[in-house]
Amino acid sequence: MHPDSALGNNPIIWSATPTPFLEDGALDVPSLERLVEQHLGLGVTGLFLAGSCGEGPLMPNDQRLQLVRETRRLAGNRLALSVQVSDTSAARVRENILQAQEAGADYVIIAPPWIPRFINPGFARRYFTEPLEAAEVPVGLYLLPTPPECGLDLALWQELASDPRVEVIKDSTCSDDFLRGMMEVKTRRPELRIMVGYEFNVIPAAQAGYDGVVLGTGILVGGIIRRAWEAFASGDPTTAKSWQDRACAFMYDLFRPDLSAWLGGLKYALVREGLFSTEFMHPDYPITDEDRARIDAALEREREFIRPVG
């Protein structure tokens, strides 16, 4: 039984984790072991594997499955494992679901298709609903902003979230309308677990009644955001805001205020902390010496909270 099965009123803290690679692009298994222990030390309860931060869409399929298998082996049942299975069509999503289940996923997460120009309302409905028949584990939906012509509006997301096979929502829309819309579904389906995916402002989601977070920088800020959520839940919004502000300042130091250093800054920080062995990544997010100096200072400033004791 994975940790989220017995959380009670505690928040769900999932990390949309980056993936460690060797310089030749192979999966870095020793770093993956450090990744697992780092998350556990921060109080993270689950991992979201092969998402955008994890470079899942850019990996070969075999490597993505290796990532799931190795993470399951290293984590055992100490972390819930969700795997992004998004693709370009319902048929490909179905195939990804079957493979992720076989590799050990606890959840499969479907985000919108990678090629927006192919999407219209009919395609979108088929893309999300047809693969559900293949799912033997709970399904999650990843809510992202999409162009209006795609047809992925709030009404369709609410329809999809009402399916009993859907148990998890990651909401990264940053939309008050979507927040209220998902909570409307939750009033009819209280078992539905809704998590906010925007780590720069989790407090409105906590206030609305969301169940937790899925953090793209959770490998470092998971403990800080957990403190923010718990402070708000205990009736101390001032302390909650202080923790949130602290997390934001740290993340802006990693990524720059416009987020243009995103994955480059994160992977540099993880190498500096001895968690990853290389900064290899598939996309291109170059950083400067000025970035490195700023990140080094931020790591030192927040060391007490970004690295587990012991």
Image (cartoon, rainbow, N blue to C red):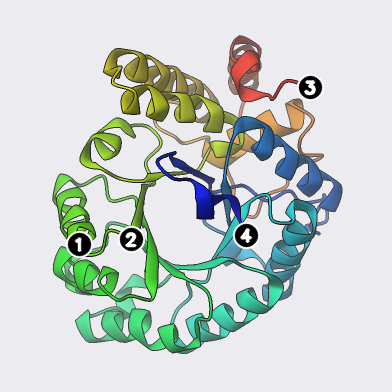
Looking at the image, is mark 1 or mark 4 earlier in the sequence? 4
Residue indicated by mark 2: 192
CA–CA distance between discs 3 and 1? 42 Å
- At 20% across and 49% down in the image, what residue appears? 179
Residue placed most toward the observer, 228 or 284: 228
SS category of the residue bearing label 2: loop
Q: Are marks 1 and 2 in contact (CB under 8 Å)?
A: yes
For the C terminus, the image quarter is top right
Q: Is residue 137 left or right of residue 29?
A: left
Residue indicated by mark 4: 1
Q: Is residue 306 left or right of residue 36?
A: left
Structural crowding at the residue carrying mark 3, measured as other residues with C-alpha within 10 Å and reported as few (<14), some (14–19) or many (≥20): few
Residue indicated by mark 3: 310
Looking at the image, is mark 2 or mark 4 earlier in the sequence? 4
Looking at the image, is mark 3 or mark 4 earlier in the sequence? 4
Looking at the image, is mark 3 or mark 1 earlier in the sequence? 1
Q: Vertical placement of 93 versus 54: above or below?
A: below
